[in-house]
Amino acid sequence: MSIFVFAESSDNQYKKSSFEAVSYAAEVAGKTGTTVTAVSIGKADNAAQLGEYGANTVISINGPAFDSFNSEIYAAAFAEVCKQGNASVAVISNTYCGKAMAGRVAVALNASLASNVVDYPDTSNGFLVKRGVFSGKAFAYVNLTSQVKVLALTPNSVEIKKNGSAAVVTSQSVAAVSSTCTVTGTNKITGKIPLTEAEVVVSAGRGMKGPENWNMVEELAEALGAATACSKPVSDMHWRPHSEHVGQTGITIKPNLYIAIGISGAIQHLAGVSSSKVIVVINKDAEAPFFKAADYGIVGDAFEVLPKLIQAAKSATAS
Amino acid sequence: MKILVCMSVVPDTTTKITFTDNNTRFNTAGVQYIMNPYDELALTKALDIAEPAGGTATIIHVGPADSEPAIRKALSMGATDAVRINAEPLDAQFVAAQIADWAKDKAFDMILTGRESIDYNGGVVCPLIGAMLNIPSIQVITKLEVNAGTATIERDIDGGREIMTCTMPFAASAQKDLCEPRIPNMRGIMAARTKPLAVVEPVSVKTGVEYQSFELPQPKQGVRMISADAPEELIHLLRNEAKVI
Ligand SMILES: Cc1cc2nc3c(=O)[nH]c(=O)nc-3n(C[C@H](O)[C@H](O)[C@H](O)COP(=O)(O)OP(=O)(O)OC[C@H]3O[C@@H](n4cnc5c(N)ncnc54)[C@H](O)[C@@H]3O)c2cc1C
Ligand SMILES: Nc1ncnc2c1ncn2[C@@H]1O[C@H](COP(=O)(O)O)[C@@H](O)[C@H]1O
């Protein structure tokens, strides 16, 4: 019996969320007295490093069918090794790719499934997991009662713990299932931090007046190593791409730091961002509802505050 | 062209979420229910594809009779007919199993869902149905065109977009950008009154997922205000007090 964890990679590099998932699996394995097997699918550099985050064994599955992500093929291969290794728990990151796999893995393993998991399970009496519901407006505790459990872990929910050493990597050949879907191309936004995984997010709303003013937002984001986001009207007016829209009808995020500039803080916006650890609000209206959900606030005109803030951020990160 | 569109019915986005019975049940008092916004996109896309081809777009919903106004809305948007599986939608695995069981012998070319329902946000009904029916499931799609039996699809991936082709049948989940949702017009609303809405009893399914209790996020400790003239103070606090940069 072992806890299996899928280590997702992109451009040959493991994602930060994969290290979180392995650390998470190691913690659960420690509690339940079992081991961790990390499964790497497709091309990725240095699979042995997964051991440093707590994997006892690493299985690597490769071949032309695994070169691009296909949820059917990846899920079937991961489920196959989980079955062979008699997995009791399978951990997958709650990313777009991870979620696409998780459902299929659960069906293949006849397992209970919980997505949006935000904390370690309580195994003192059953297997109780905490998951985000209502777009971050609340959490639910669900008891998973099947023999096998599949968990999709929300990025930035647990700390990465690096206290192991490089693991032995075993290549395993797994026959790829056939699929009627073929990936014909990808369009990656390079050089930008994906919003769902970012630790710091700089976000702006209608208070920025127009798309031409976003250079300040981007400059601050760059100085802080942050991803950029926006409110719904901003993406509706095509000032910014839809992929940046956060909130109840957009993306739900959970960064360590969320900086909201010129955003009023409507309930639908808060839903998507209120799980952020620290929230900073910059708004010229002292009565803006967002201040109630903030940890730090500045009442001021973004056009005056931002240049100074960018300056301060640049000199702080330079030192 | 036969398309099945899965619809969930969710609390209106302005709902203040609270719980009752010692935090074990969602408090539905005064809550307005609506068609899940992403499902409006799935239905609109289904209609855009089905109508010119003389096909059908059937709505399926797992839920109690209270959901019928939302189902009527879907019919007034243009759905051909609707099916309601008469059961509490306990969790995503239960819902997917009901839909897969009903759809398995009906030869749909496509099953569309929303990216996620804005209440329980599993985002997993689409891959679950795909796996249960052994067809591909493509998540968070932003483009879908069908040509001679083959679909060209674009989907969001973390940090970009992927372009793929897929032969039918398949399941896919709708993301923003796929289309603009249709708004029902008067004719649609009139027509919806007489469109077929079948009520089907559920099959027995055991999922191994039990909701035990709910919790609201910890309220913030109160905001610490910083002068607009001293943003460097903010950077200092974020670095040394909050330790997030
Ligand atoms: C069904 C539904 C779903 C929705 N889903 C979402 C969602 O997912 N995400 C989302 O964001 N919204 C969503 N909304 C919209 C939401 O209700 C708000 O309308 C929206 O969040 C407001 O965006 P905003 O804060 O950018 O704009 P506004 O409400 O116009 O606020 C602009 C703010 O900027 C401030 N400001 C103006 N000028 C300056 C300046 N120079 N310097 C500093 N501050 C300034 C103003 O004081 C104000 O507080 C949804 C609405 C509905 C009905
Ligand atoms: N009770 C339900 N009945 C029918 N379809 C549903 C139901 N719940 C969820 N779905 C579909 O599955 C999608 C994703 O839901 P979820 O996995 O719950 O986030 C929704 O957008 C719907 O298309």
Image (cartoon, coloured by chain):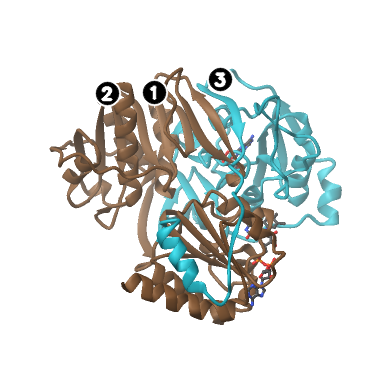
Chain colours: A brown, B cyan
Which of the pair B241/B16 is nearer the observer? B241
- Amino acid type, residue under disc 3 in the picture: Val
- Categorize mark 2 by other alpha carbons within 10 Å: few (<14), some (14-19), many (20+): some
Q: Which residue is mark 1?
A: A148
Residue A177 position in % (x across, y down): 31, 37
Which of the pair B84/B47 is nearer the observer? B84
| Number of marks | 3
Q: Give the alpha-carbon distance from disc 2 to disc 3, as whole Å.
A: 31 Å
Which of the pair A89/B56 is nearer the observer? A89
Please identify, in this view, whether the residue under mark 3 or under mark 1 is nearer the observer: 1
Please tell me in which quadrant of the rendered image residue B83 appears. Answer: top right
The answer to whether residue A242 is left or right of residue A310 is right
Q: Which residue is mark 2?
A: A34
Residue A161 position in % (x across, y down): 29, 42
Q: Give the alpha-carbon distance from disc 3 to disc 1, as whole Å.
A: 17 Å
Q: Are marks 2 and 3 on the same chain?
A: no
Residue A260 position in % (x across, y down): 56, 64
Q: Secondary structure at mark 1?
A: loop
Residue in the picture at 68% in, 22% down: B201
